[in-house]
Image (cartoon, rainbow, N blue to C red):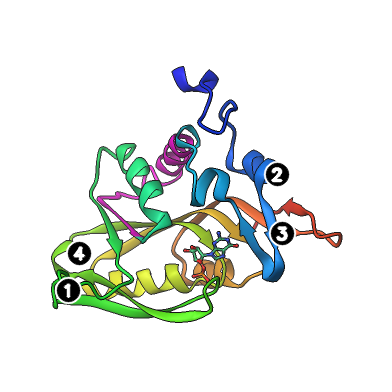
């Protein structure tokens, strides 16, 4: 493929999520992993393409016909991944009560771990229906608030969550276990843990 040797905007050849975390990830106080140089602020598009291809491979047999995520960081991941599912529509849950958002919405309250506050997320009833087989995607999985909130919204619409795909799961927070306990297939491209000296290691679940 042409992009294997392509230089990315951050000046290096494409790598995996795990390689990028080891090279650029910074573990902060409270177990917050900063990945601003390739995922959350500057975006490494070649890496995003690999992420999209990998989710498409992992959920190939799930019958996905819609991707659901949450603004803002999930949107890029979802849009690139959608291309590998034959351009299925992407819907993102909105965090703000926009004047132009229909009043007819599915909504739930989610607690943000990184911001330390609750917010309401909303999806217009127009964009989810009982025929939908939904793949939920997000950048991080910490306590599972965002992903479980999105699953609630899918359920309320009568649609089915056929999978949850996460770029970076944090093993030391409970979200992964909570989602696995629901029986919905969860695939995380990297599961990070912290070693005693504070450095990052990867684990499997
Ligand atoms: P959860 O809802 O699973 O508790 O947290 C997931 C959400 O919080 C993600 O959408 C992500 O935006 C944010 N988040 C949680 N932990 C981290 C982290 O360590 N680093 C970053 N950059 N975002 C995080």
* C-beta proximity under 8 Å, tags 1 and 2: no
Alpha-carbon distance for marks 4 and 1?
A: 20 Å
Judge the density around disc 3: few (<14), some (14-19), many (≥20) Cα neighbours within 10 Å.
some
Alpha-carbon distance for marks 2 and 3?
A: 12 Å
Residue at which label 3 appears: 193
Eye-nearest disc, 1 or 2: 1
Q: Is residue 66 magenta?
A: yes
Choose top left, top right, bottom left or bottom right for residue 98.
Answer: bottom left
Eye-nearest disc, 4 or 2: 2
Precedes in sequence: disc 1 or disc 2: 2
The region drawn magenta spans: 48-69
Q: Secondary structure at mark 2?
A: helix
Q: Residue at x 42, y 40 (%)?
A: 52
* C-beta proximity under 8 Å, tags 4 and 2: no
- Say above or below: 11 vs 43: above
Precedes in sequence: disc 4 or disc 3: 4
């Amino acid at each position: 493929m042409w992009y294997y040797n392509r230089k990315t905007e951050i000046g290096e050849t494409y790598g995996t999520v795990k390689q990028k975390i080891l090279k650029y990830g910074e573990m902060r106080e409270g177990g917050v992993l900063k990945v601003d140089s390739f995922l959350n602020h500057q975006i490494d598009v070649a890496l995003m393409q690999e992420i999209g291809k990998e989710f498409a491979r992992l959920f190939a047999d799930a019958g996905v016909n819609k991707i659901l995520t949450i603004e803002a960081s999930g949107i890029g991941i979802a849009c690139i991944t959608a291309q590998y599912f034959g351009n299925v529509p992407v819907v993102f849950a909105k965090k703000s009560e926009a004047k132009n958002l229909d009043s007819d919405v599915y909504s739930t309250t989610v607690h943000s771990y990184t911001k330390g506050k609750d917010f309401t997320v909303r999806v217009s009833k127009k964009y989810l229906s009982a025929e939908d087989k939904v793949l939920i995607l997000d950048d991080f999985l910490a306590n599972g608030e965002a992903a479980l909130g999105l699953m609630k919204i899918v359920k309320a619409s009568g649609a089915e969550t056929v999978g949850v795909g996460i770029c970076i799961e944090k093993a030391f927070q409970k979200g992964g276990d909570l989602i696995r306990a629901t029986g919905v297939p969860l695939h995380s491209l990297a599961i990070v843990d912290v070693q005693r000296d504070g450095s990052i290691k990867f684990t499997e679940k």
